[in-house]
Image: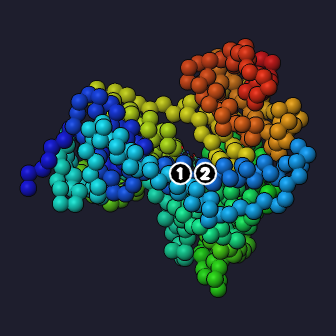
Amino acid sequence: MTPEKFDVVILGGGNAGIGVTGPVRRAGMSVAMIEADLLGGTCPNRGCTPKKVLVAAGHALHEIERASIHHIAVGKPKLDWAALIDREKDMIKDIPVNLARAMAKRNVEVIKGHGAFTGSNTIRVGSRKLEARHIVIATGSKPRPLPIPGAEFVITSDEMLSERELPASVIFIGGGVIALEFGHVYARAGAAVTILEALPQLLPAMDADAVARLQAESERIGIRIRTAVSVKQIEKAKDRLRVVFSHDGTVHAAEADRVVNGAGRVANVDTLDLAAGQVEQANGRITVDRHLRSISNPNVYVCGDAVPTSPQLSPIATYEGDIVGRNIVDGAKYSPDYASMATSVYAVPPLASVGLTEATARQNGLAIDVQVNDMLDWFSAKTYAETVAWSKVIVDQATDRILGAHFVGHSGQELVNIFGLAMRFGITASQIRENVYAYPTFSSDIKHMLGHG
Ligand SMILES: Cc1cc2nc3c(=O)[nH]c(=O)nc-3n(C[C@H](O)[C@H](O)[C@H](O)COP(=O)(O)OP(=O)(O)OC[C@H]3O[C@@H](n4cnc5c(N)ncnc54)[C@H](O)[C@@H]3O)c2cc1C
Ligand SMILES: NC(=O)c1ccc[n+]([C@@H]2O[C@H](COP(=O)([O-])OP(=O)(O)OC[C@H]3O[C@@H](n4cnc5c(N)ncnc54)[C@H](O)[C@@H]3O)[C@@H](O)[C@H]2O)c1
């Protein structure tokens, strides 16, 4: 069969794949995008967007918990979980159709199906064979398989976003972003939540002091946290599940209605027949150069969660997609820079972070000023009856530039973007202090968070 010819074939129609289409279509290239499931991928259909609808309900419960501080009498709130899941699903239901319309307007041919390599420039999807000058792997990630007996009993974030019944109890294997975000919503909705983390610290990549604040807040709302555990197996215990784990050389067990895989996500590339495409990989990790191009097949680029080395975040997937698109158009010359990428763990309240942790800055041998503030006594925190309000800002002594900023509470998920902006465009700590902020706002506390310089 003669293959259909395109300039670019993109495997995966999530943030990363869609990000590629802008530059290549602006350059007039012909583009096919193969999508096996819902256009938009994880973030709008099974990730960020629906998750945030549940988190928003968690925030409302958190506000109600503190209503009495504002002298408002309210009864015990009752969350209708099924209705909340319906609201979440209703909010996202039109996204794939709207994206299909956007792709059609951009003249991207969207092909439904599972794509895989048949050669270094060819892809098979269903009965069709496509040939392209450039192929982009933007197939996202999937939950890391748990290599333990009973792993088949575990659910993932997909089920948590779909199940209309609130479980009475949940155990998370892994104490990362998914465990903290869903754990906070579940706990505030009344479920008993346990988090079992393999490493000594929850959220191991985050600043240790910030994580300690979030852990204290998590325990305050009743979440049980065990770190430095080794999960051995999961077994049925009548109509519940039992997780057997060891901690400090002793074997323990915990039971719950649901056990969730919160142990990280791995690149979703094992069904692409990479060998046929001459795309080098080791243990499912495709080796790419600094331009996100396969080191073994220069016709192939990788972006988004499928890249094994960059943070698995939605804006980063879009950003990498755009870089790949521009590399296809202009030749491989653009490289990603993640230094000023802000991120948030949407617990209630959230932990937000940008740049280096204090530990990393010190490991790098940098001369730094570290401003740590527990802001619970500050007017803004007291006005809003915050339960935790904490910041750490790290400034490079040599250049006065921001190296990192970390927040728990205090609208950190918004403030962190101001610090990201400063880092990206070289705005110094002194300049941030000099700015005049609307008052009273959490942003107007920024100059105090930076100390006096
Ligand atoms: C529960 C959850 C919450 C999250 N919350 C946030 C958040 O709040 N903020 C944030 O920044 N990030 C969040 N993320 C991460 C974010 O969703 C991902 O980083 C982002 O969606 C990755 O985009 P992508 O395009 O690389 O992959 P995806 O969006 O996963 O897209 C990949 C697409 O490829 C398709 N595909 C796979 N294989 C094939 C094939 N062989 N052929 C054709 N199609 C294929 C899939 O169906 C999928 O649609 C969250 C993730 C999860 C799981
Ligand atoms: N707000 C957000 O931006 C957001 C929200 C949800 C998910 N995500 C993305 O999705 C990805 C997956 O989320 P996640 O929470 O599953 O992963 P994660 O990488 O955040 O955390 C996984 C945790 O599980 C631990 N772990 C691994 N194996 C284990 C085991 N066998 N037993 C116990 N603990 C184990 C790890 O040490 C780590 O702390 C993240 O990388 C994140 O980037 C982002």
Q: Residue at x 59, y 75 (%)?
A: 233
Image coordinates of residue 317 in percent, x first then y, are: 45, 41
Task: For marks 2 and 1, give the one nearer the viewer.
Answer: 1
**Which residue bears the numbered disc 1?**
91
Give the SS element for disc 1: helix
Q: Which quarter of the image is occupied by the C terminus?
A: top right
For residue 224, above or below residue 72: below
Q: Residue furthest left?
A: 1
* Label number found at residue 324: none
Q: Residue at x 49, y 43 (%)?
A: 314
**Which residue bears the numbered disc 2?**
53
Looking at the image, can residue 392 be seen?
Answer: yes
For residue 248, above or below residue 255: above
Looking at the image, do the residues carrying marks 2 and 1 touch, with CB atoms under 8 Å apart? yes
Query: Is residue 366 left or right of 445 when viewed as pictured?
Result: left
Query: Is residue 333 left or right of 187 when viewed as pictured?
Result: left
Looking at the image, can residue 261 be seen?
Answer: no
**What amino acid does circle 2 point to?**
Val
**What amino acid does circle 1 point to?**
Met
Q: Few, some or many C-alpha atoms within 10 Å of disc 1 (few <14, some 14-19, many ≥20)?
A: some
Query: Is residue 366 left or right of 139 when viewed as pictured?
Result: right
Q: Few, some or many C-alpha atoms within 10 Å of disc 2 (few <14, some 14-19, many ≥20)?
A: some
